[in-house]
Image (cartoon, rainbow, N blue to C red):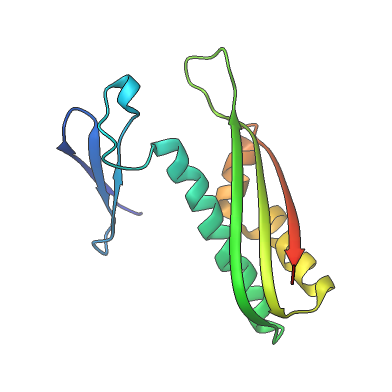
């Protein structure tokens, strides 16, 4: 079992989350809803987790295939459902941007495996009804 501790540390809605290894992130709500821009919005943390999860998968897959990744970044865009009290992610798109000595088929397959098989955050979002899409930019 994993334990995360979350404590209010700033204003009304500024929280700090700490994992078992002492790593922390700061979270807050928007100023319009009572926050003070102390940290990242919790729903944005979820998209950050998606990027981290899929990024780790892709790097590990390509590393096993002896591909050299010199640059790796992602752009993640999300659209939330409207008209509900809880507003889950409706559509999320990731653009993977890789540069290096990387075979295009291997890069595409690594992204595909991460997004459809290995990334637990992607699967969690999918099970919640999120439409996940992605694209690969290689050496562009």
Quadrant of the image for the N terminus?
bottom left
Q: Quadrant of the C terminus?
A: bottom right
Pick the front one: 102 or 5 = 102
Horizontal side of residue 130 vs 140, given as left or right: left
Give percent across and percent down for residue 94: 66, 50
Q: Where residue 41 sits: x, y (%)? A: 39, 37
The spot of residue 56 in percent (x, y) is 55, 67
Considering every residue shown, the one lying at the far right of the view is 105
Q: Quadrant of residue 117?
A: bottom right
Above/below status of 76 relative to 74: above
Q: Is residue 61 above or below residue 35?
A: below
Say whether residue 3 is left or right of residue 115.
left
- At a point 26% along the width and 40% down the height, the residue shown is 38
Give the side of residue 8 with respect to residue 87, left or right. Answer: left
Residue 99 falls in image quadrant: bottom right
Compared to residue 91, the image places residue 111 above or below, namely below
Q: Look at 71% across and 62% down and name the residue there.
A: 111
**Residue 82 placement: quadrant:** top right
Q: Residue at x 45, y 36 (%)?
A: 43
In this view, which residue lies farthest toward the top?
A: 83
Give residue 120's position: percent from left, percent from top. Answer: 57, 53
């Amino acid at each position: 079992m994993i334990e995360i501790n979350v404590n209010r540390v700033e204003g009304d809605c500024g929280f700090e989350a700490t994992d078992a290894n002492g790593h922390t992130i700061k979270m807050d709500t928007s100023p319009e809803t009572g926050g003070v821009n102390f940290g990242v919005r919790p729903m944005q943390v979820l998209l950050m987790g998606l990027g981290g999860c899929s990024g780790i998968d892709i790097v590990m897959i390509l590393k096993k295939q002896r591909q050299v990744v010199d640059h790796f970044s992602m752009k993640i865009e999300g659209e939330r459902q409207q008209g509900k009290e809880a507003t889950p992610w409706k559509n999320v798109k990731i653009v993977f941007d890789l540069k290096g000595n990387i075979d295009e088929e291997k890069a595409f397959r690594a992204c595909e495996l991460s997004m459809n098989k290995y990334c637990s955050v992607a699967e969690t979002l999918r099970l919640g009804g999120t439409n996940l899409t992605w694209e690969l930019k290689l050496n562009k």
